[in-house]
Amino acid sequence: MLLPADRDAPDCIVDLTDVRFAWDGVSASAVVDIRSLRIARGERLFLRGPSGSGKSTLLSLLAGVAVAQSGTVRVLRQDLAALSGAARDRFRADHVGFIFQMFNLIPYLTVIENVMLPCGFSERRRANAQQSGGSVRDEALRLLNHLDMAQSSLLRRPVTALSVGQQQRVAAARALIGAPELIIADEPTSALDADRRQAFIELLFQECTREDATLVFVSHDAALASLFDRTLEFAQVNLAANGAAA
Amino acid sequence: MIVRLAIKSLRNRKFTASLTAVSIALSVMLLLGVERIRQESREGFASTVSGTDLIVGARASPVHLLLFSVFRIGNATNNLRWESYQALAGRPEVAWTIPIALGDSHRGYRVLGTTHAYFDHFRFSRGRSLEFAQGMRFSDAHDAVLGADVAQALGYRVGQSIVIAHGAGDVSFALHEQQPFRVSGVLVRTGTPVDRTVHVPLEGLDAIHAPEADASVEDPLAAALRGREREDSAAPARPITAFLVGLKSRGAALAMQRLVNEYPAEPLTAILPGATLQEVWEIVGIAERALLAVSVLVVVVGLAGMLVALLTSLSERRREMAILRSVGARPVQVFGLLLGEAAFLTLTGIGIGVLALYIVLVTAQSWLAARFGLYLGLSWPSVYEAGLVLLIGLAGVLIGLVPAYRIYRYSLADGMTVRI
């Protein structure tokens, strides 16, 4: 396990200090209680923990969907609590890409439209995508091509007819489009079989490197840890989880 | 962005969405249709008599007298004597009179015996007088002037011969075959029962009803009927059913009405058409209001159907909302997505409903007119109708607030975690 990045580094993408969060607002029943968590730019962090350990809540805090009752959550040096709800939503649209466990795609949109979706909500990512690919559509195609998903037979298919692995790759392309600084993947491989799992992660690494994105990868599957720069046992980071687990 | 998503999402749920829109469309069509029929029938009724101050007939209920004399609905129970007519028509306050003799028919259309006064004085739709599309008035006792619908439906032209039957039914056994009438003119369409009337001179009716006409008996049943008729009409030399009166001064109407109602020689009834029409509305009003209430309820059911469809879609769409939230959609936008769908469904429903109503109006217009005497004009929606439509639209959007608010609460609570 590598040491956390230098505390004073300006390139700290995520910086949590004394963060406590309880869904009902009472800190005695906190599901997240983190003294300190830092993630450096370009890092590929593996956050391992069993389900129910508060991982999803932590991701909600990083995304600004939930706001901690105490402590500070800084993403890209921005204190999320200082932003209004709408501004947090914009911040997330601009800077964070998500990949969920499964059912990532909007069923009534095409593959391309699903990939282009974040550019409809973020000016910044649209501009980035246009700069990189010429047009948002071309950039979506480029990313899909990198993820081996650009065959016209696949693009024409309704997203619900794609295999889970294909869906996850489309979701990865959507998370990456417009070059957000932070990619958060929440159990993205748990629906894939073992050999597909590693291939997907490697593709994801490759694209994160290309896009200069920081990756936070959450999973309960310790077998994947060896692929990452750094692994954090969530139970050790989250003080609340110890109590809950015991 | 949200609008495009809403449209694509609806397209994905084509079947339920179109069912919802169609149910709203049908309810809108029903409501507007009922309203249209209500207004047009009132207007049609009101425009049928214009400029007539009094209608006089044998003693009868005022509503009944109005209905059969002007609207050709129902049959006269009694005739009035020619002498009474002449005495009343000759009074100094009377400017003109139009005698009317009903009781015969031609292939289902009523035959109305009258005089030239009919073409001179009859007015409809705020003072319009009758005009000829073809030909001219009667110049002979056996001439006939056809209403526009009669000529069109039966394909008659000026110069053709027609045979009049006794009684008002579609099929009559007693034909006045030996004395055919010649079509001398066809009237311009009026949008009133005049269009469905065959006009003949009173002299013509006298002739076919005269005993001599029985000289050649061709059918025992017809002969029997004619025999009875002769007995009936024995008393008045020339029976007329009613007459319309125009006064020199409208102020004399009430006095004249009293005079007729107290006429010593014969029990008569005089009505003021406007006042009696008001009575008709009072009778019809209850049914109208019930019909309106039902069609309003149907609209409510249509909108409730949309509410149910949207609410049931919510649970499966929570995941979709979580994805949208993760790519940066604000809860307000998620709210707008649902509200937009409700608004879109309502507006589409209204659009289809209004369109369908007009299509039905165009196709059913002549049928309604022929069958029920209901003239539905193809006018633009009135301010009142536009108001109704606006109200429905508003109600649809208000109803959309319910699922929109629920998904808004969900997306605040769920954030991006998808609860299945």
Image: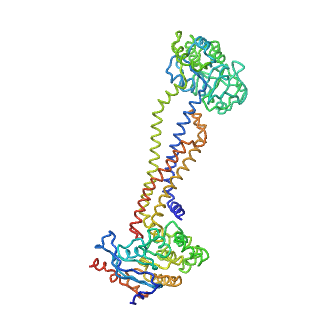
Residue B280 percent coordinates (x, y) = 50, 28
- The quadrant in which the C terminus of chain A is found is bottom left
Whether residue A135 is visible: yes
Q: Which residue appears at 62% of the width and 12% of the height?
A: B90
Residue A78 percent coordinates (x, y) = 45, 77
Q: Is residue B8 above or below residue B226?
A: below
Q: Between A160 and A36, which is closer to the camera in this rendering?
A: A36
Q: Is residue B162 above or below residue B27?
A: above
Q: Extreme bottom residue here?
A: A2
Q: Extreme left residue here?
A: A246
Residue B65 percent coordinates (x, y) = 53, 22
Left-right relation of A122 to A71? right
Q: Is residue A66 above or below residue B231?
A: below
Q: Is residue B256 above or below residue B386?
A: above
Whether residue A111 is visible: no
Q: Between B361 and A154, which is closer to the camera in this rendering?
A: B361
Left-right relation of B263 to A27? right
Indicate how the structure is coloured in the image.
rainbow
